[in-house]
Amino acid sequence: MRFRGTAGAGAPARRDACDADRMLAVRGASVGYNGHAVLDHVSLTVAPGQIHCLLGRNGVGKTTLFRSILGFLPLLSGTVTVDGRDASQLSDRALSHVVAYVPQAGENPFAFSVRDVVALGRLSRMGVFASPSKGDREIVGSVLARLGIEYLADRPLTELSGGERQMVLIARAVAQEPEYLMMDEPTAALDLGNQAQVLRCARELADSGLGILMTTHEPDQLRMLEASGTLIMPDGTYLTGSADELLARDNLERAYGCRVTAAEHVWRPAL
Amino acid sequence: MENIASPRVGIARERLVVVGLVAALVVVGLLSLTAGDYDMAPARVAELVGSYVFWWVQTVPARISALFGGGPAPVFTTSRDSVVLFVIRIPRIVLAALSGAALAASGAAYQGMFRNPMVSPDILGVSNGAALGAAVTILLGFSSTGVHVVSFLMGLLAVALVMTIARALGKGSSSVVVIILAGVVMSSLFSALVSLCKYVADPDDTLPAITYWLMGSFSRSGTYQNIGFLAAVVVIAGGLLMAIRWRINALSFGDDEAKAMGVGVKGTRLVLILASTLLTSATVSFCGVVGWIGLIVPHMARLVVGPNYRILLPVSMLGGAVFTMVVDDVARIIVPGEMPAGVLTALIGAPLFIYLLIRGRKEWL
């Protein structure tokens, strides 16, 4: 596995310049469909080791922004750069070496084994016509071990629970050996235990040096993950900051269009 | 070797399946030599094959000298039996096997790309396009070679047209749904044009010719030239699909996920469609429309070895070859004269498919 943050003893000045480049940066991006902007002039950055959450109510453009950053949708204006390189200029293959996508656990009609699914994460590092090599298979094994899901290796994907499936999709993304993970509502429809597993996993991956951008509907997760966040308002403006800066009553009420209370005794998964 | 095991399947089992299918291919192929209206005992078959091999080895020098203008090429003395065996049966059996492999491979590939196990190889209109080519050329009185060539090209053209329309509809980004819609629309257009050809055809002559052609049969195109062409298509296009087998796995997770895994979705899809179209169009132009094979054979293969194209694709091709040879044997034996293979595949395929759906529902729905 590639771990970041061990750049070694280079010249300090140069390392600073280098570190400034080391980020996933969205600058002045307008995103939308067919030329109609859903969100205008969004800027945000995710640094290695950092988790950044995208918050906002349904339909506000989180997913559109997310898909645009991944290159599934063309940007209407602005740029997305990864480690200083313009993402739109990178091939799918080159981008997939740096940014990996963890989709919401969706449906595949075929009963692929977990091992095969995670092996697909190695595709971008294999020759175009090749099969996973011995080295690839070892990486698949070590990723499964690292995420603590070796016991799922030979199970068919179609027979897994939602939480297990989410972990497998994370494993597939980690097998790509990326520097950034894009997680689309990773805890949607999961019970407390599975939420805890997925969030703990995200935190550990970030601690090992990955930068993570995730969408979520749980403002509390900012605190749990010690993450920064971007809170998108219904009018298309947004706030960026730490949990303490964002999670104020009037911010949340404006963002979600309802009254909120800070409850004293709410059970949430502990990481 | 890759030994990433499928869910319920170890490498040993995969090997067993492949070896079993190769053995079945040989055994069914040999049994097929004796099947048909014209009685030929296995001993007689062995005797004829033996004498042909003996003749072939013996006349190698004579043929080499004939090649350089040193006299006439030697000719194998034929009998009634040897004509039935070498001119009719062997090419027909090989044609059936190659057709089955081709249809099963393209069906399996399309099912992955369209993420739908209900898809068959003619989803993009290749069969109806090829059928239209055949109907028009039969109407115009072309030779059988002319019918094959035009029908093959029309199959390719039909899919090219579908892809162009899909691209126009999708404004550059042709999604899978748009491709399927364009395929359905064009298929039905081609089938209307085939009906038009039938309507204007001479009811005593060309109408029955078109009708029989459409039913699908392996009896009419078994020449060594035809099977040479089909074999080349199966090797090239089948090889192309085998080469991108891991990419087909990725495509079955949807375009977005495949793209994020670094798979060039458009390019992969293009290669897959091109290969599948070549396979199906070549088959249809020789054998007419023989349905169901491309739908049910990949299903059965998936039940046995799982969905990974690494193993699913070769097993589908072998299984398709065996299945189609068996169907063709039954077509020859079941009634005096014979039965159109296309009718028989539907009669076998429909109930078998329903049975497979009941048994394996968990895996695909």
Image: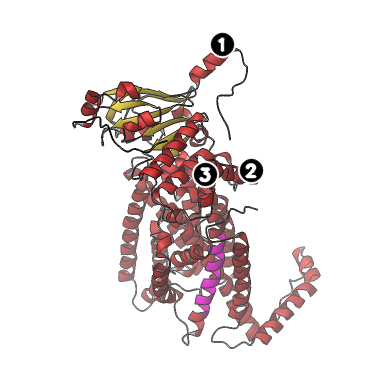
Q: Which residues are magenta?
A: B314-329
The answer to whether residue B309 shows anywhere in this view is: yes
Q: Tell me where residue B134 sits by quadrant.
A: bottom left
Q: Earlier in the sequence, mark 3 or mark 1?
A: 1
Q: Position of residue A28 (x, y in %)?
A: 35, 21
Residue at coordinates 34% horizontally, 42% vertically from top-left? A188
User: For the residues tagged 3 and 2, is the chain the same?
Assistant: yes
* Kind of element beneath mark 3: loop
Question: Disc 2 vs disc 1: Cβ atoms closer than 8 Å?
Answer: no
Q: Position of residue A96 (x, y in %)?
A: 50, 35
Q: Earlier in the sequence, mark 2 or mark 1?
A: 1
- Between B333 and A145, the one lying in front of the other is A145
Residue at coordinates 30% horizontally, 70% vertically from top-left? B199
Q: Position of residue B349 (x, y in %)?
A: 42, 72
* Kind of element beneath mark 1: helix
Residue type at mark 2: give it: Gly
Q: Which residue is mark 1?
A: A13
Residue at coordinates 57% horizontally, 87% vertically from top-left? B38
- Cα distance in 3D space between marks 3 and 1: 39 Å
Q: Quadrant of the C terminus of chain B?
A: bottom left
- Between A109 and A12, the one lying in front of the other is A12
- Cα distance in 3D space between marks 3 and 2: 20 Å
| Number of the label disc, if any, that sits on residue A148 | 3
